[in-house]
Amino acid sequence: MAAVSMTVNGRSVTADIDPRTLLVQFLREDLRLTGTHVGCDTSQCGACVVHLDGKAVKACTILALQCEGAHVTTIEGLANGTELHPMQAAFREHHGLQCGFCTPGMIMTAVDLVNRKGSDVDEHTIRHELEGNLCRCTGYHNIVKAIAAGARAMAQAPLRQAAE
Amino acid sequence: MTATGIGAPVRRKEDQRFVTGTGRYVDDLNRPGQAYAYFLRSPHAHAAIRRIDKAAALASPGVLAVLTGEDLAADKIGNLICGWMIHSKDGTPMKAGPHPALAQGKVRYVGDHVAVVIAETLLQAKDAAEAIVVDYEVLPAVVDPAEAQKSQAQVHEVAPDNTVFRWHLGDKAAVDQAFARAKHITKLSLTNNRLVPNAMEPRAAIGEYDPGTDSFTLYTTSQNPHVARLVLSAFIGIAPEHKLRVIAPDVGGGFGSKIFIYAEETVCLWAARKIGRPVKWNAERTEAFLADAHGRDHVTEAEMAVDEDGRILGIRVSTIANLGAYLSTFASSVPTYLYAPLLSGPYDIPAIYCEVDGVYTNTAPVDAYRGAGRPEATFVVERLAEVTARQLGMDPAKFRKKNYIRNFPHQTPVIMTYDVGDYHASLEKALELADYKNFGKRKRESARRGKLRGIGFSSYIEACGIAPSQAVGSLGAGVGLWESAEVRVNPTGSIEVLTGSHSHGQGHETTFAQLVSDRLGVPIENITIVHGDTDKVQFGMGTYGSRSGAVGMSAIAKAIDKVIAKGKKVAAHVLEASEGDIEFKDGKFTVVGTDKSAAFGDIALQAYIAHKFSGQELEPGLKEGAFYDPTNFTFPAGVHICEVEIDPETGMTSIVNWTAVDDFGVVINPMIVEGQVHGGIAQGVGQALHERAVYDASGQLLTASYMDYQMPRAEDFPPFTVGMTVTPCPSNPLGVKGCGEAGAIAAPAAVINAITDALGHEDIAMPATPHAVWRAAQKSQMRMAAE
């Protein structure tokens, strides 16, 4: 067993874990944050995407021990209390999900891609950036629409907050 | 139409939990004291098991049990079943080989279940599984369905030539006559490639046993928990039906693969009692590739006969369907009654004959996958139609128009009676949305850039909303295919609807609530849809075959009618009028011709407090149930047009436009329906361009992960153009037909027709990978140069 400490969704956590434990197992099984999903064993599907120190990572591809001292944000930590993050709201508004299993990873990837590519990111770029996230339900059509709308809403959110 | 009623694009009620990570899938659940199951699977496609030495595994840390097929037999646990009886042409019943949940004496495919290790942790279970020593005698394997009947390898003793059935449908003599007087005959050899369903949530199960009540609970990723309970009780014999509760909570996609009752959930339940602890299993993706039931896998010879005017005279089809190593739950129905009755497509075809041989091979079981038989039929009909039109020099749209059915009801020569449709309307709208008249201009523009542009049609029909119980019973089904519902009105006027349908992405919590809101005038937020738990919902046949709208919602509509009827009785007392004078409209009970009325919620309260009527005259309460058995299949139909651009240098195919015009009858929620169409198209395009489960000659699955099996990705698609036409379905009270499978049924033929149009080359197999397209492009360029 080995000790690990990190900050998850703003909360400090410490645990003794099997050194083979992946970050996604640590989140799901030790912290019971089950919003981060596991859809494959080969880092292809992206259902497990979380933010590690502000950047999207596949939580199935990193050991929990490698995250010592890091800040991790999962889907559960994205909303501001009861107010959905603009990207979460956009997925709902544009029907960007059906069974919901890929959705947490999609949303975490989407937020990261807007952070990197800007709020006026075009459709082609969105489709390309989703290379590491698989969805079997939606045909991606409404996911792409949702991300474009979420990107615009993310740009407006800070302005709205400032105005308030 | 109200903002939340039928026809409104209501945003989904279920999304709040899914976008915040608070959905509850089976793997998110953990039971106190649970242990973990890990399955040791066969590394061989075909082998006799001489001996299993589990001593070292049993001595491994944390191990609670190592169980094999012998233990299963000792406990008299029954085999898994196939619930649809098919008879061969000669009247003999299909040859169903035994299908134990853990192998007994023999393994028959790579991934077959040899033993299960139950341990304190998953890692301990995996470590111990490596310590099990199995002495295999490797046997010759058969993999290719076209070779199965001649192979030396024999998968099951009951089927010496690996043939499950030799089935047929239609009038052979009439077809032979039609071909004899044909002006033109088109012949095609087609392979419908084998697919792996790949719902994003892998299958999972938790089995639990309560010794105090001698009862079991199964948490499982199922599309039909009541069917699972029935099979696990009545056939496998885990527990009597009333001692087994099956819960299918949030389920992350199914596409057919979660209909079936598999080995793993059977073993988890059985093992839970043996070790006295809950037992959890969650598939890894490679396990899903190996052991989820696969889809399609047909080898077909197909012919179409036409007269001098381009009218179709007949279709003749001969198919070998790979059913894999064991017959999965509904495997036998897919290449027979879900396939051949669709070979008329939307066309008026006087004579059709289809023979199907179902064969065993040493591969994973094959069963229903989105569309189930209907994509295979549509591929046959629409490839034949397209190629025939081209060979006759006719515009493919005109050829289809000439042959469309115009009068309804229409009896096809292969069982089905189409109730209603307007195929011309769908085609005309699709041609317009796809800007078909300017395709030539676009093709020339592509050519200027050195690209090959092609356009392809798929004018599909499907039979869904399955189906009248008597009809499916006469065709061999072991169950009835009605649906049940219960509408429980609470004293405060809020409502729970219990349904036997199951939502695993379809959005029933929203669409079903829309129906109730529309009919009863109750705000949608005051309605909860309850599904997926056999202790809550009395019974249900579940969700597959696009049946939840046509059958599941019709049951709800019927229960609502009963609630309104009961409400009128209560209202008559409350409003002091005779029952015949009460009408219910816009959420109010009114005495006809007066301004006396009572809101639905007030009547609900009165029904429960029962102060205004005698309990001897009228039962208190407001709760009604209904079973609904449909009167016919439903027949959604439509036209999909795919436009591709091919780079002949690389063989890369880009889909540049996709137009879909579907007739689903009455649409409850257009946003959700369009989403179903998008997803279906993507799966169909996946089949046409990317996906194929590949076994090598020894039976090893070469495509057992996302590294090797190409799933469609966002960049593979343009935005889809989706339109609709509506002919209300006369076979159910809502007029709905079903939309869940249409895209997957229509898409493969549209893509292949577009690619072959671009290449000027008729022979390209699915998946049309860049390599295959490049080779075909080279061939046609060489041919054109020679000409």
Image: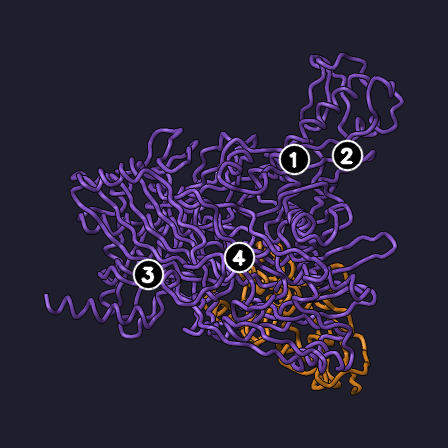
Q: Residue at x 71, y 62 (%)?
A: B74
Residue hosting label 2: B489
* Nearer-N-terminus badge (3/2): 2
Q: Which residue is depicted at the point 48% across and 37% down? A: B634
Q: Which residue is mark 1?
A: B556
Chain A, chosen colour in render: orange
Q: Secondary structure at mark 1?
A: helix
Q: Chain of mark 3?
A: B
State yes or no: discs 1 and 2 in contact (Cβ < 8 Å).
no
Mark 2–mark 4 CB contact (< 8 Å)? no
Query: Which residue is the site of mark 4?
Result: B97
Task: Check the residue under mark 4 and report the chain it is in.
Answer: B
Chain ID, mark 1: B
Between the residue at mark 3 and the residue at mark 2, the CA separation in whole angstroms equals 53 Å
Which amino acid, mark 2?
A: Val
Whichever of callouts 4 and 3 sits on the residue coming sooner in the sequence is 4
Q: Could you confirm whether marks 1 and 2 are on the same chain?
A: yes
What's the residue at 75%, 83% (across, down)?
A18
- Residue type, numbered disc 4: Gly
Q: CA distance from mark 2 to mark 4?
A: 49 Å
Compare residues B176 and B134 and report the one nearer the observer: B134
Q: Nearer the viewer, residue B721 or B67?
A: B67
Which mark, by number, is residue B460? none
In the picture, measured across the screen, residue B561 lies left or right of residue B635, that is right
